[in-house]
Amino acid sequence: MLSTSDLLAHTLAETDFHPRLPQQRRLYEAAKAAIHQQQLGAGSKLPSSRDLARDLGISRNTVIAAFEQLAAEGYVHSELGSGTYVSDLQAHSASMRGVGSAPHSTRAAVPRNTASSVPLSRRGQALTSFAAGPRFEIQPFAPGDADFSSFPFKLWQRLQNRVWREARADLLDYGQSGGYLPLRQAITEYLRISRSVKVQVEQVMITSGTQQSLDLCAQLLADVGDTAWVEDPCYWGARRVFEARELKLHPITVDSDGMALEEADLATTPKLIYVTPSHQYPTGAVMSLKRRRELLEVAVRKQAWILEDDYDSEFRYTGRPLAALQGLDNDDRVLYMGTFSKVLYPGIKIGYLVVPPALINGFKSALYDLQRPGQLMVQAALADFIALGHFTTHIRKIRQTYGARRELLRRTLVHQLGAQLAQTVTISSEESGLHLVVELPDRVDDVALEKLAAESGIQVKALSTYYLAPPVRRGLLVGYAYCTPEKIAYYGRLLAAVIQSGVR
């Protein structure tokens, strides 16, 4: 049998104990491992610090420091005049043994918990069943992905370096005022000019993106069991947020003019109304002026809050961007939100939320108390990026790029599908957004086509999977932003073949 010194020397030689760790940490980890593996059982006496130091060829102070750490965490204890002994780590659970059980009975080993062996709550199982991450990884034609490879890295680096050189301690804090003031001012001016939003700087809150904006709204404006009207089909991210907050979702059909309210819908009383009026996700429909005014009137009558998600308003390829619904609101019922993740790069994690004046204090307090936003250094760089005109230049550049890719994708699909499918397959004509919708006949299984396309390395999405109610339309969402012209031409032919196989 190995002596304690030999056992620890053998354990220290294992690869788990990296040689760059401090010597006392290596000895501590080795002794702890031996105790957990019951190689040093309860009551085992450890060598004296002097003897162990000699046997291992290390300093006595190193051994003493390791012993002190083990004692502080309860692995060993000292008995005056006797020495240092391994503690009984099972003693604390003696009261949990069954009555009459033997104090030294053998206990079955408990397997270490893993993600797959620990059951989630019912809510957790429901929320993770969609598995959005793997479904939306960047692959050819993945809808909603922007080409952040065209981001001006060097320019951004210079702006960030300038902020860091200023060495402002206040930018290292969480931020208690709804975000970095110059960035909020820049966003205010941008929204007034480009989106016709009625806004004062005090109304703008900087969030980590649309998901957080929606979550704040769900927490502060609704209670568990309240009803939220959502478009059908609906953006999956909004749906997940509302489900996580245990709201009752009431789907409302979307047609070519946006959310179409019917008598059955008006018989319910929503607390929240989620819409993407300027470019509905995922169908691409634009809400008509008549529908917008109707929705505002309903919100006032039912005392509901409208959550306007303007997620890709910058990507309109013909004419000026459409005015926001919020700009028509005279009763302060609309909360307007957007994000920089699509325009700049996803990892920037900066969005904005414009709240009515009556909600400013509550939202500002909740943003700080619940989220601890931070990222003020990045916010400062972004404020300069906008103020110096780089943001406008970048948008203009990528809008031209995406517009050209969109047109190339349309031409490729139309050409490859051929005249024989022109009467059965429709390709969306909206001049905006980051994806096309290839609408299919009702008899076609778009989920099966999605899987078939995946076998060719194409990440399209089935339109029917976005519905809460039984789907009324079938189709495929085909992204084009994160796809070079060469890939569009190549994968476009493959996708057309997949569609042809499903429609014939």
Image (spheres, grey):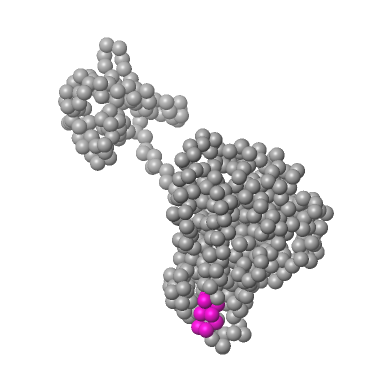
Q: Write down the quadrant of residue 282 in the picture.
A: bottom right
Residue 258 can be seen, yes or no: no
Characterize the magenta stretch by its predominant secondary structure.
helix
Residue at the location (21% across, 37% down)? 13
The outermost residue toward the front is 388
Residue at the location (59% across, 85% down)? 422
Write the start and end of the magenta stretch as one range: 408-416
Quadrant in which the C terminus appears: bottom right
The outermost residue toward the top is 81
The residue lying toward the viewer, choosing from 469 and 297, is: 297
The residue lying toward the viewer, choosing from 475 and 326, is: 326
The residue lying toward the viewer, choosing from 13 and 280, is: 280
The answer to whether residue 429 is above or below residue 48 is below
Q: Position of residue 267 (x, y in %)?
A: 80, 59
Q: Position of residue 224 (x, y in %)?
A: 68, 46
Quadrant in which the N terminus appears: top left
Q: Position of residue 112 (x, y in %)?
A: 39, 42
The outermost residue toward the bottom is 420
The answer to whether residue 461 is above or below residue 352 is below
Q: Position of residue 70 (x, y in %)?
A: 33, 25
The answer to whether residue 9 is above or below residue 472 is above
Residue at the location (66% across, 38% down)? 365
Q: How many marks?
A: 0
The answer to whether residue 498 is above or below residue 204 is below
Residue 164 can be seen, yes or no: yes
Q: Specify whether 451 is left or right of 57.
A: right
The residue lying toward the viewer, choosing from 72 and 378, is: 378
Residue at the location (60% across, 69% down)? 317
Q: Write down the quadrant of residue 258 in the picture.
A: bottom right
Q: Is residue 80 in the magenta section?
A: no
